Each structure stands twice: as structure tokens, then as C-alpha cells.
Image (spheres, rainbow, N blue to C red):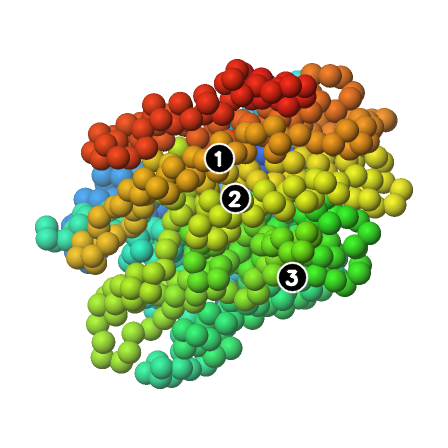
């Protein structure tokens, strides 16, 4: 066993690394009168994951951050998680004790205490590090991967990853889980699905001092609620529940100056796992946040650099932008380690799914053709992928800075927020597709506002709460819109500006533009869209996002029907009343949506259908199992089946029960509004037998009518 520096020598606490993996002894200071040895922030994370979609046990995934208390009781050391949600913050011990005795902590582990010279304590915490603290077995079961159990004899502490620093101590354990009946969800990702081995990183971090200024959440600002706190000592004229935002500690060198350099900048490090060209795009995009901090009065407050060689990406000293691989494409995230008492961000971790880049490349090849690759032109798919990667990096880093989604960001001020999901802005010019302005560069007006509200400092002598309220009102006065996840992702959501992957303020006009771009792309679609030597069967995958290219704009247009423009107002700001979308706009949206069901929109030319009937041979691949249009014709491409899939996009948005219920209520209040009867009459007139036509058009219309 090899001793690391003890706490007295400048580290958080001392460690003794066991190269055989059997023990992990730590050396702690003496216990206080209450038996408490120390209190630390503790965060487990995944250092080496599964790469299996929809399970979530991926590299760089963060578990919950909690306050872990080491307490000595006789010959034992007990580890407990504090209950931080329920507090009594007036400083009176009696009130604090009443809350502590009302809400239980969680004692999760105990080990044998060994007396150290000078009154300290040593304890082997290998048992703690080798427990399934992330509930990986539960996640596997929930993901239908199988009923796994931790295999202690196949698990160990990786002493090579143990390290002690002044403000954090890092450990890593390697855990193996076994089952006799693995599920299909895991078989593709591991060599033997009966046994899976992952590496779990454990970060113990010094509790931040009391110098951090908490900030109460304002629903108008697009910031993330991190701490929901019940204060049972609060006065009766104040709310008992407090919501605090999460943010980094950012301190000006000159606190009284409107503009100042900072004591410690926020630095994010890009993972060396990303290939160089991708890495450059990630650095460029993430650095755009420096613009927002600069506008908020901070000089050199935000940086992005390459992760130093040899650094473990899960080391708590580094904010990391991690490049994560999975068997098929999945989500990206921006997560944080946060002090659960205050909302202070101690560390940011961004996960960027690598296969997203290849999916985007396939989409751009489908739109403009593979021969445009490496041309350097505005429609070069490689150039467009890099532009999209810049958007991905700045978006997820925004989450790690404390911002939530703003799904209204694409609807005003020239794409006002990188916290929206960015659809490429494509214009039809001279019969072709213009992608010269596909993606914006830099952060938007909303992003500057949100960072100023979240990190800005009130002028000297000003009341901070009033200053922050003034900023929020100023944003409202400028017409800034904010729509969060909860009002965007549902098929029946009412907020007309809460949309993903859309463009523009006028959803109906942009639907017409998107359909025109789709029509041009499909008219030219074929073998030219494939890279040289690629299997012709790849066209069956490539056509899916092109044939359904209009789907997100369909959703945006549908939200005008039964739409209600409401906000996150506070009393007295003048924005408390919601407004129903005018009847004329609702009817225009209905006309546009019915147009997406026309056989003219759903048909494909015969020469294209012929090349779409090539198939892939060899071992089945998940890409060809889950990302193809449905078929009831065996190998040949099923055009009516594709038409049904496209029609479902429209019907699922248009005929959602919540939307129809709103139409009934809106028409009750205003008889001139669009009614449910009118909606169904117009759909029936467009799709009924009288409009059947002849040949393939009649069959496509019949299939759509059947849906």
C-alpha cells in the first residue's frame, strides 16, 4: 500500500492507495464533540459506461450530488447523506433541531474505525466505493436490459485513479453486474451480455464557504431551479418554499465597477477524445458564451481550452465537455455538480453524443448530395456539420452554466437563443436550396439577457431584488419570449411559440418554405446523395429525415390551432393575461396542415422508388431496424406506408385531445373561433371519397383517410 499526502499536508483528506485493489484506506482528522469527522460534497459519476441507448449509464454521466457526513461512533465510521431540503435558517438551534428530528437523513454505509496518531481516524472505504450507489442495476432493469446483480468478486477499486488534492479527492471503482437472462437492449453493446463491467468515479469535494450569494429563481428568466428549500423558520408574511437558481461563483476584482476582470474565470475543457476537426468546432462554439459574460460586465470571465493530457475527465477540478460514444445516436446533456444548500455550481459536465455529427452529415447529404462534401461551399455537408457542432457545444454548455431551454428562441430577434433546438434555416432561391445562413453564429439577444440576469451584479447601492426584477421587466418590454420544456414537448401543448427544431415567427409561412425545400430535395434525391462506394441501401435511411423534413414545422403550425399565448408572469408585471390565437391564424394553420396530407406532397417519383428498394445484406444493424420508414411490402419500398407515417405526424399534432378540448372552450367563449366541427368537416372534405381521384393518388388518399 502506498500512502498519499495526508490532509495535514494540504489535501482534503489523506488516502492510502492499495495497488492490489482490496482496500482503500482514507485518513481523516479527529471527530468533533458531536462525532462528526467531516462533511463533503459527494458525486458519483460514470467514467466508463455501456454505450447502450436509452439506459443512461454512459461515460461522463453524473449522479446526484449530496452532502456526505463522516461520523465516528465508537469503533465505527458511519457515512450519511444530509437532508438539505428541509431547513430552519434563522440561526436558532431549537428550530434547527426540530427540523432535523422531523425529516430523516440516510445512513448508507459503516466501516471499522482505526485510531490514528493525534486523534485522527483511518477507515477502509472500499465497501462504500464498491456499492451500487448509482443504482445501475435498477437502471438496467428499467431499461429492459435484464435483472442484474452486483458481482462483488468481479469488482474492485482501481487504485491507479485514486488522487488527493487540496479541495477534492478522487476514487474510481470497477463494478461488474451479472444476470442469467440479459435483455435485448444490452446485447448489441457488450461482448457478453451476461456480465457487464462499468467504471464508477467518486468525487469528494470540499464544501464551499459561505461567500456565495444565492439568487432566488424568477420564472421569466429562463434559468434553472436547482434548490427547492422549505424554511420552517420563515416569517408568516414570506413563502415557506424558496426556489434558488444554480450558477457558478463569479466575483469581480473590482466589485463596485460596472465592468471588471474576475477573481477566477469559468473554464471549460474540451475532451481529447473528440477528433481534431470536431474538437475545434466544439471549442469555437462553446467560446461564444464569452460574448454574453462580456456584455454582463465581466472581462475574461469565460474560457474554453483543451483538456490537459493525462487528466481524468471526471476529475472534479475540471469543467469538461465530454465526447461520448453510444451504439446509436442519443441525447446530449449539460449537467452540474451543485451545492444542494445554495445552488452554487462547483463543476460542469457536458456530454455530447458523437453519432449526432454523423446523423447531421447524412441529413445534409440527403438535402444537397454527397458530391458537395469538402467543396468549402455554403452547402458543403462537412462545413454544415461543423456549424451544427458549434451549436451543440454552446447549447449544452449553456445548461451547465445554469440556463434552461428556451423553445421560443427561434421565433424572434434573428434566432434569439442558442438554448432553443436549432433547425437549419434553408431558403429556396432560383429553384435551389440556399444554406448560406443555415446556422447562426454567436449567442443571441435572449442569451445575453439570461446571463446578465443570472450572473450580473447590481450597481453599487442598488437593491439587488429590485434590480433583478427590473431586468426581467426590461426583457418583457423588448418582446423577449421564453417557453420552457413543460410547455413544448407535449403533442397537445397550447403555447404557439414553444417549438423545437422550427424557424421563424410565422409558423404557417415557414411550413410553406420547409415544404418547398423538401420538394426540391426529394425531386433530386437518389444515388447522387450517397458517398462513393456506399451501399445503395443507405438511401432507405437517408430518405427518412428528408421525406419527413417538415415534421417539426407541422408541430409548430398545429400549436396555432387551439393555441393560447401565455407566459411565466409575476403579479404586477403586466403580462399576467393569456391571449387566444386569433381565429384567422388558426384557420390559416388548418389550411396549411391539411395541405401536408395531399397526395402531391406524399408521392415520390417512380425512378426513386426503384433505387429505394435496395436492401442491406450481412449482420443486422440497429440503424436498419429502428430508423426506416414502415413497410408492409417485404423488401420493396412501401410508398403508401411512408405516406401513412407522414400523415400520422400531422394527425397526432392536429387531433390531440387537449387541442380539441381547447377548441370547444374557445368557440364557446367566441362563436367566431374555429370549432371542432369545422375542423373535422374540412379534413373530411379534403380526404373524403369525393376527392379520391385515380391511380396512385387515390391509394395514397385512401391510406391517409384510413389513418
Dot 1 or dot 2: first in sequence order is 2
Q: CA distance from mark 3 to mark 2?
A: 19 Å
Residue ID at (28%, 27%): 664
Residue ID at (44%, 50%): 506
Q: Is residue 157 visible?
A: no
Taking the image as shown, residue 84 lies to the left or right of residue 127, namely left
Q: Nearer the viewer, residue 368 or 489?
A: 368
Q: CA distance from mark 1 to mark 2?
A: 9 Å
Taking the image as shown, residue 547 lies to the left or right of residue 143, namely right
Of helix, strand and loop, which one carries label 3?
A: loop
**Residue denoted by label 2:** 511
Q: Which disc number belongs to residue 634?
A: none
Image height of 276 relative to 65, above or below:
below
Asked if the residues shown at circle 1 and circle 2 are in contact, with their CB atoms under 8 angstroms apart, the answer is yes
Of helix, strand and loop, which one carries label 2?
A: helix
**Residue denoted by label 1:** 593
Dot 3 or dot 2: first in sequence order is 3
Image height of 38 relative to 448, above or below:
above
**Residue denoted by label 3:** 436
Amino acid at each position: 500500500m502506498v500512502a498519499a499526502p495526508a490532509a495535514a499536508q494540504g489535501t482534503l483528506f489523506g488516502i492510502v492507495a492499495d495497488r492490489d485493489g482490496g482496500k482503500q484506506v482514507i485518513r481523516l482528522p479527529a471527530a468533533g464533540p458531536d462525532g462528526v469527522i467531516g462533511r463533503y460534497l459527494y458525486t458519483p459519476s460514470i467514467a466508463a459506461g455501456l454505450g447502450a441507448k436509452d439506459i443512461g449509464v454512459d461515460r461522463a454521466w453524473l449522479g446526484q450530488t449530496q452532502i456526505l457526513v463522516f461520523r465516528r461512533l465508537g469503533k465505527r465510521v458511519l457515512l450519511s447523506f444530509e437532508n438539505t431540503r428541509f431547513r430552519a435558517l434563522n440561526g436558532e438551534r431549537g428550530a434547527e433541531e426540530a427540523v432535523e428530528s422531523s425529516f430523516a437523513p440516510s445512513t448508507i454505509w459503516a466501516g471499522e474505525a482505526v485510531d490514528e496518531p493525534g486523534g485522527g481516524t483511518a477507515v477502509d472505504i472500499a465497501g462504500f466505493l464498491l456499492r451500487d450507489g448509482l443504482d445501475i442495476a435498477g437502471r438496467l432493469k428499467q431499461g429492459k436490459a435484464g435483472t442484474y446483480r452486483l458481482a462483488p468478486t468481479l469488482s474492485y477499486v482501481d487504485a491507479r485513479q485514486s488522487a488527493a488534492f487540496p479541495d477534492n479527492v478522487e476514487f474510481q471503482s470497477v463494478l461488474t453486474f451479472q444476470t442469467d437472462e440479459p435483455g435485448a437492449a444490452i446485447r448489441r453493446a457488450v461482448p457478453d451480455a451476461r456480465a457487464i463491467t462499468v467504471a464508477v468515479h467518486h468525487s469528494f469535494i470540499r464544501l464551499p464557504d459561505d461567500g456565495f450569494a444565492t439568487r432566488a429563481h424568477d420564472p421569466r428568466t429562463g434559468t434553472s431551479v436547482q434548490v427547492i428549500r422549505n424554511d420552517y423558520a420563515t416569517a408568516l408574511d414570506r413563502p415557506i418554499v424558496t426556489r434558488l437558481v444554480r450558477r457558478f461563483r463569479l466575483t469581480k476584482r473590482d466589485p463596485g465597477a460596472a465592468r471588471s476582470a474576475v477573481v477566477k474565470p469559468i473554464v471549460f475543457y474540451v475532451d481529447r477524445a473528440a477528433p481534431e476537426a470536431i474538437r475545434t468546432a466544439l471549442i469555437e462554439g462553446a467560446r461564444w458564451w464569452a460574448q454574453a459574460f462580456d456584455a454582463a460586465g465581466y472581462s475574461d470571465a469565460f474560457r474554453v481550452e483543451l483538456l490537459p493530457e493525462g487528466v481524468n475527465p471526471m476529475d472534479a477540478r475540471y469543467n469538461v465537455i465530454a465526447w461520448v460514444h453510444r451504439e446509436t445516436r442519443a441525447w446530449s446533456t449539460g449537467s452540474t455538480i451543485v451545492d444542494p444548500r445554495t445552488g452554487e455550481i462547483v463543476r460542469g459536465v457536458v456530454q455530447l453524443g458523437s453519432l449526432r455529427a454523423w446523423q447531421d452529415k447524412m441529413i445534409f447529404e440527403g438535402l444537397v448530395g454527397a458530391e458537395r462534401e469538402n467543396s468549402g461551399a455554403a452547402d458543403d455537408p462537412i462545413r454544415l456539420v461543423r456549424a451544427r457542432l458549434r451549436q451543440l457545444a454552446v447549447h449544452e454548455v449553456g445548461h451547465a452554466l445554469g440556463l434552461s431551454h428556451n423553445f421560443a428562441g427561434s421565433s424572434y430577434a434573428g434566432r434569439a437563443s442558442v438554448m432553443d433546438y436549432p433547425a437549419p434555416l434553408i431558403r429556396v432561391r432560383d429553384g435551389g436550396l440556399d444554406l448560406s445562413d443555415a446556422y447562426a453564429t454567436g449567442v443571441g439577444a435572449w442569451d445575453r439577457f439570461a446571463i446578465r440576469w443570472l450572473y450580473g451584479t447590481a450597481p453599487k447601492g442598488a437593491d439587488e431584488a429590485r434590480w433583478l426584477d427590473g431586468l426581467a421587466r426590461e426583457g418583457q418590454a423588448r418582446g423577449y419570449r421564453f417557453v420552457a420544456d413543460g410547455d413544448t414537448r407535449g403533442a397537445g401543448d397550447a403555447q404557439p411559440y414553444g417549438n423545437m427544431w422550427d424557424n421563424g415567427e410565422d409558423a404557417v409561412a415557414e411550413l410553406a418554405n420547409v415544404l418547398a425545400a423538401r420538394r426540391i430535395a426529394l425531386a433530386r434525391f437518389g444515388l447522387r446523395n450517397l458517398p462513393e462506394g456506399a451501399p445503395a441501401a443507405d438511401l432507405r435511411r437517408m430518405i427518412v429525415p428528408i421525406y419527413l423534413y417538415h415534421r417539426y414545422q407541422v408541430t409548430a403550425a398545429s400549436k396555432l390551432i387551439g393555441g393560447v399565448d401565455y407566459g411565466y408572469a409575476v403579479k404586477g408585471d403586466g403580462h399576467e393575461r393569456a391571449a387566444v390565437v386569433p381565429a384567422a391564424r388558426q384557420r390559416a394553420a388548418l389550411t396549411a396542415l391539411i395541405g401536408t396530407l395531399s397526395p402531391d406532397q406524399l408521392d415520390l417519383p417512380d425512378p426513386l422508388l426503384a433505387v429505394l428498394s435496395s436492401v442491406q445484406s450481412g449482420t443486422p444493424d440497429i440503424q436498419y431496424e429502428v430508423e426506416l420508414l414502415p413497410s408492409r411490402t417485404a423488401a420493396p419500398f412501401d410508398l403508401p406506408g411512408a405516406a401513412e407515417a407522414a400523415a400520422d405526424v400531422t394527425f397526432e399534432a392536429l387531433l390531440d385531445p387537449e387541442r380539441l378540448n381547447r377548441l370547444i372552450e374557445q368557440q364557446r367563449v367566441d362563436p367566431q373561433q374555429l370549432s371542432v366541427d369545422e375542423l373535422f368537416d374540412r379534413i373530411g372534405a379534403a380526404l373524403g371519397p369525393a376527392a379520391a381521384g385515380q391511380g396512385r393518388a387515390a391509394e395514397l388518399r385512401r391510406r391517409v383517410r384510413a389513418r
